[in-house]
Amino acid sequence: MDVKQAVRTAKLFVREIFAEENPVDVLLEEVEFLEDRDQWNVTIGFSRKLDDDDGRGLRMRFPEPRIMKVLAISDSSMKLLSVRNRETMN
């Protein structure tokens, strides 16, 4: 698989895995290929939409802060190997 296919596959996995949490603005953040592991590590950022009652019975939608997930995908089988939070430097 090439880098474009790895990114498309990672975005699809995010949309499927987090479907109940309504991921929005699903975007590529980082990508790397680990040749010794035959593995793509693709970092995808997204927001979740939450409903909030405004006190008048109306529902408003507010996105949460961006979430970053690193998806490890096998290059040869295109299977998802793991999903983890991206560690950030504070």
Image (cartoon, helix red, strand yellow):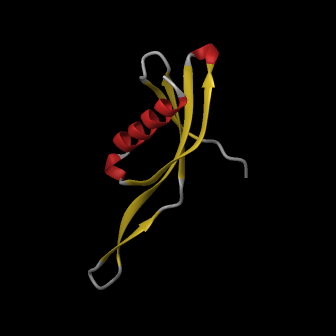
Q: Is residue 82 depicted above or below 90 in this figure?
A: above
Q: Residue furthest bottom?
A: 56
Task: Say left or right for 26 vs 16.
Answer: right
Which residue is more in the foreground, 16 or 4? 4
Indicate the quadrant where residue 54 lies. bottom left
Residue 35 sits above or below residue 10 on the image: above
Q: Is residue 38 above or below residue 28?
A: above
Residue 77 image-quadrant placement: top left
Q: Position of residue 42 (x, y in %)?
A: 55, 35
Residue at the location (28% across, 79% down)? 58
Query: How many dots with numbers?
Result: 0
Image coordinates of residue 22 in percent, x first then y, are: 35, 54
Residue at image coords 47%, 15%:
76
- Which residue is depicted at the point 63% across and 14% down? 36
Q: Is residue 13 left or right of residue 45?
A: left
In this rendering, the answer to whether 65 lies above or below 15 is below
Q: Position of residue 59 (x, y in %)?
A: 30, 74
Residue 86 image offset from top left, x and y in percent: 60, 41
Q: Residue furthest right?
A: 90
